[in-house]
Image: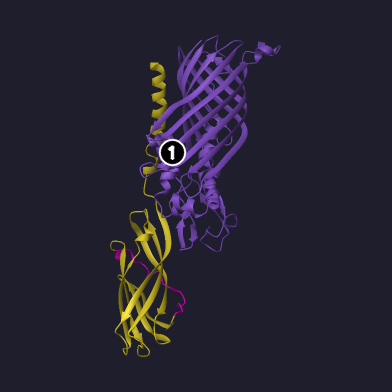
């Protein structure tokens, strides 16, 4: 009986030694590409010809079960004008996420309810890793409009495609 | 203890690292999930299927009447290169799971024992009513297994007892005692018969070698709870049957015995995943020619041997035990 127990022990020991460290050798990385929207409420600008919007956006869903961001880049952005009493807003605009200047003096013509064409962010400007704080990033949209703003309360919807490497 | 039970534990726990975890894949679409996981997991059941067919004998010479041997047998089922990837074709899947790169229609993705490098894991786009998300294909654990055991292999171990019966016939029984840990369990049982045929063939019986035929069957069963604390209903049942038929030859040279065999091996494995929005069942089977050669060292009762077998997944086996008569 003792001999049987020895063999049982040896079998289990072999399997234990074989598998016990298999899943602990180095972090596993994933690339994730997902879209995040933020709706910026723009109020009190009627009659003016400049826009300044500050908005926080939570991108922690990119992590899901991972624990840290290794890389994070904005690949593209689409802007949509919503709930605006005029027809459109045109002008040159700047868009920053954290310290990354995604767009500088970008000419845009935003028609109510119509998403802008997808604006691809150059890879030299797309890195937002250092700007992520507790899963959130600060979005700033500023610019000068070609004509005076015709509404005191409207929304700018910004949809970002973000590519992140997480582990 | 959970890790001991079965290697498939590894793959399921591994998938929880990622953005798309196992549960999300299972819940996307049962047909897609079944197809995807069949490709991803395939080296595990194939590895066990091949590994369990090995290590049955280390001589073609049967015991004397009531002679006995008892051994621990360790098998390494080596993963071939083709077992490290599986082909993902967009056309095989619904629009819920597609390759993210629209310029290609198929790609090789790592299996559970393939690469975990991001460069080997193209993006997969998952789509549901909430939109799309693209995530790197699930990682393989080739490097982790290699760093642990030195080979990319599926290991298995079993205890075996052989008894000499009449007419130069050995009965072999192998088993893994029931291991049970918080609902996770594993056990194995196998039976084999080796019979000396040299005694029945005129002239051949005078040859200075031993010649036998062998048939063996092994069954491995296990249950792994995927989330034993929160969702004990989420589990995997893994069941593998393996058969081996061979003609054996051996030659004893003092304390050494050279042995080998020719024949076939076959297996079927079933994986059942329970506790999610839909049950998933998939099976694997295979058969191949089997040729093996080994060397046995026997000093008094001590019995040590090692062999290498060429088959669907080549298997290296080592065995330590005692043999009397």
- Neighbor class of circle 1 (other Cα within 10 Å; few <14, some 14-19, many 20+) is many
Can you identify the residue that label 1 sits on? B224
Color style of the picture: by chain
Tell me if residue B263 is in the magenta stretch.
Answer: no
Chain appearing in purple on the rendered image: B
Q: What segment is highlighted magenta in the picture?
A: A113-132
Q: Residue furthest right?
A: B202
Q: State the image quarter where residue A165 is shown.
A: bottom left
**Foreground: B56 or B225?**
B225
Task: Residue A114 in the image: state x and y as whole percent.
Answer: 46, 79
Shown colour of chain A: yellow
The picture places residue A79, in percent across and down from the top left corner, at 41, 76
Query: Residue A127 lies in magenta, yes or no?
Result: yes
In the structure shown, which secondary structural element does the residue marked by tag 1 occupy? strand
Quadrant of the drawing holding the N terminus of chain A: top left
Q: Position of residue B178 (x, y in %)?
A: 43, 27
Q: Quadrant of residue B269?
A: top right
Q: On the rendered structure, is B6 left or right of B248?
A: left
């Amino acid at each position: 009986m003792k001999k049987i127990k020895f063999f049982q022990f040896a079998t289990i020991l072999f399997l234990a030694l074989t598998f016990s460290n298999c899943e602990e050798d180095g972090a596993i990385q994933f690339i994730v590409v997902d879209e995040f929207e933020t709706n910026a409420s723009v109020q009190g600008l009627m009659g003016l010809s400049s826009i300044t919007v500050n908005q926080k956006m939570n991108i922690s869903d990119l992590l899901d079960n991972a624990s840290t961001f290794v890389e994070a880049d904005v690949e593209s952005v689409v802007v949509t004008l919503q709930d605006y009493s005029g027809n459109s807003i045109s002008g040159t605009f700047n868009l920053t996420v954290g310290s990354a200047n995604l767009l500088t003096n970008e000419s845009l013509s935003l028609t109510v309810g119509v998403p802008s064409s997808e604006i691809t962010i150059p890879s030299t400007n797309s890195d937002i890793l250092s700007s992520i704080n507790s899963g959130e990033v600060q979005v700033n949209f500023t610019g000068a409009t070609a004509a005076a703003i015709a509404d005191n309360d409207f929304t700018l919807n910004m949809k970002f495609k973000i590519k992140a490497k997480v582990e | 203890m959970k890790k001991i039970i079965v290697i498939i534990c590894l793959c399921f726990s591994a998938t929880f690292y990622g953005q798309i975890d196992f549960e999300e894949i299972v819940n996307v679409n049962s047909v897609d999930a079944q197809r995807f996981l069949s490709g991803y997991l395939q080296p595990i059941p194939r590895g066990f299927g091949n590994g369990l067919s090995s290590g049955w004998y280390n001589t073609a010479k049967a015991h004397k009447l009531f002679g006995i041997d008892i051994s621990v047998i360790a098998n390494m089922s080596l993963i071939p290169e083709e077992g490290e990837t599986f082909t993902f074709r967009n056309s095989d899947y619904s629009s819920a799971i597609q390759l993210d790169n629209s310029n290609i229609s198929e790609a090789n993705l790592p299996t559970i024992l393939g690469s975990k490098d991001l460069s080997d894991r193209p993006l997969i786009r998952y789509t549901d009513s909430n939109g799309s998300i693209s995530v790197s294909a699930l990682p393989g654990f080739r490097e982790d297994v290699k760093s642990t055991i030195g080979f990319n292999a599926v290991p298995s171990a079993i205890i075996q007892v052989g008894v000499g019966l009449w007419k130069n016939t050995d009965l072999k029984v192998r088993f893994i005692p029931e291991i049970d840990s918080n609902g996770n369990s594993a056990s194995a049982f196998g039976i084999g018969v080796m019979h000396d045929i040299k005694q029945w063939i005129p002239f051949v019986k005078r040859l200075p070698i031993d010649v036998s035929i062998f048939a063996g069957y092994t069954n491995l069963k296990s249950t792994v709870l995927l989330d034993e604390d929160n969702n004990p209903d989420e589990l995997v049942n893994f069941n593998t049957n393996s058969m081996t038929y061979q003609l054996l030859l051996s030659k004893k040279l003092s304390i050494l015995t050279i042995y080998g065999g020719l024949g076939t091996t076959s297996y079927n494995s079933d994986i059942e995943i329970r506790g999610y929005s839909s049950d998933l069942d998939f099976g694997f089977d295979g058969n191949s020619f089997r040729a093996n050669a080994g060397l046995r060292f026997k000093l008094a009762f001590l019995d040590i041997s090692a062999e290498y077998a060429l088959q669907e997944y080549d298997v290296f086996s080592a065995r330590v035990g005692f043999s009397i008569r």
